[in-house]
Image (spheres, rainbow, N blue to C red):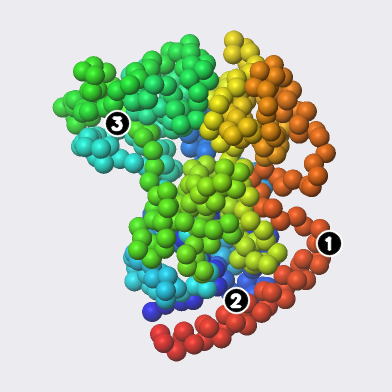
Amino acid sequence: MGRAFVYVIIGGGVAAGYAAHEFVKNGVTHDSLLLRFNMLFILVHLQVAPYERPALSKGYLLPEAPARLPSFHCCVGTNGERLAPKWYNENGIELILGTRVKSADVRRKTLLTATGETISYKYLIVATGARALKLEEFGVNALDATNVCYLRDVADADRLVDVMQSCSGGNAVVIGGGYIGMECAASLVINKLNVTMVFPEAHCMARLFTTKIATYYEEFYQSKGVNFVKGTVLTSFDFNADGKVSAVNLRDGSKLPADMVVIGIGIRPNTSLFEGQLTMEKGGIKVNSKLQSSNSSVYAIGDVAAFPVKIVGETRRLEHVDSARKAARHVVAAIMEPERTGEFDYLPFFYSRVFTLSWQFYGDSAGEVVHFGDFNGHTFGAYWINKGHLVGSFLEGGSKEQYEALAQATRLKPKIEDLGELESQGLEYALSVSQKPPSTRPAEAGSSSLIVEKPLHVWHATAGVIVAASVAAFAYWYGRKRKRW
């Protein structure tokens, strides 16, 4: 038994939600395609429609007026419409929740679900995301202790909130000094827990922050009561009579009392369905500048995709919501209008907001670093200079205009001849560079290089012809497949 669809999206995160929205924006509905359902969502394990994951480590954990679904379904993160479950049905999208895909055959263009249904597709978008790395993968057994928490989805967040509320005033140990560790530590403090962070690196956010930048944030966290234990790792737990963790044992011999533990030690892309069938790189599915995999009918976006990052000249896998959103928009254009769609020319972008702090980073953290601003105040930053050009920039406490200038300057990759002069100019350098009229119109940071110059109605008419032709071809293909079922 099976069914056939033109477009299939496998995955239920940010990338999947934004791709669905983009299809609808481009006229893919059951009315225009003369099919009741033309696109299928298969959500791996999840029981909820796609939502904005950043809310989980921010607003979801607040003690007062916390964020809860349906308030942060896609696409509210970019001030777009909220795609509640009924939105999918109203737009001719079959949304299947809580269904695992058991296997995939990219040569036959089929997926087999755990319920035994075969799904055929013309185009497949893989947006399976990633899973949180577990302690057991590093030889540490938590014995399913109920007070050991991860944070990857709503179910994880609900569990974390329950545990957090049950031990207010107690001791929380956060394992990991990256995004999840830093943002969860801030939320735990706000919820009146005593927080200790443990990580093996010399400072927090080691993949991005310089020592000077990290010191600022660590000192700010310490002023809020957070304790840092650096240069060591978790080796085991002590358990109480109820089977809960009561203490954390570290490699350096120290023991930390714990009423709850939050684990943030990284993620692993969900690629298992396609290993041995698609080319892999950097731990993810390798795609080209159109986000197309080694199989021409399969595309990949989000955490699972390794794509060419033009500004750094290499293929990378970027684990951030901004990349997922913009890749989703681009992949739909690449599928529906391949001849009109340019390369996915993405400017890497990361951000975080904790306590009263807010920072943004653009580009690449490679080469020499030039710090600027007042590290004793509220606004400071850094530039990264590689091979004589500005390739990365960071700013804490900036305004919307200042962040936009930083992004624009980074995308332009201006030549830097005097590092001392750059340091003295600081933020003013980015502001001045971004205001210079470019020789050609630059693409929006992280967006497609496609610039629409024709009137919108012309695009709609062209898209209509293309869609109609696609339907005719699909109808023929679908009819032939039905004979084999």
Q: Is residue 383 above or below residue 84?
A: above
Identity, as a three-letter code, of the amino acid under mark 1? Pro
For the C terminus, give its image quadrant: bottom left
The type of residue carrying mark 3 is Asn
x, y percent for residue 400: 71, 30
Q: Earlier in the sequence, mark 3 or mark 1?
A: 3
The front one of 482 and 69 is: 482
Category of crowding for the residue at label 1, using alpha-carbon neighbours closer than 10 angstroms: few (below 14), some (14–19), many (at least 20):
few
Gap between marks 3 and 1 measured at Cα: 57 Å
Q: Is residue 485 left or right of residue 338?
A: left
Chain-order first, disc 2 or disc 3: 2
The residue pinned by badge 2 equals: 35
- Secondary structure beneath dot 3 equals loop
In the displayed orientation, state which residue is furthest to the bottom.
483
483 w.r.t. 64: above or below: below
Which residue is drawn at the image coordinates 64% and 34% (left, top)? 389
Which label sits in the foreground, 3 or 1? 1
Separation of marks 2 and 1 at Cα, in angstroms: 28 Å
Instruction: Judge whether residue 67 can be spotted in this image.
Output: no
| Residue drawn at x 67%, y 43% as measured from the top left | 445
Neighbor class of circle 3 (other Cα within 10 Å; few <14, some 14-19, many 20+) is many
Give the vertical position of 350 relative to 171 (above or below).
Answer: below
User: Mark 1 sits on what residue?
Assistant: 455
Q: Is residue 436 left or right of residue 372?
A: right
Where in the figure is residue 350, as x and y percent of width and height? 56, 36
Q: Quadrant of residue 25?
A: bottom right
Q: Nearer the viewer, residue 77 or 249?
A: 249
**Separation of marks 2 and 3 at Cα, in angstroms:** 48 Å
Q: Which image quadrant is residue 429 in? A: top right
Q: Of the residues shown, which amino acid type is indicated by label 2?
A: Leu
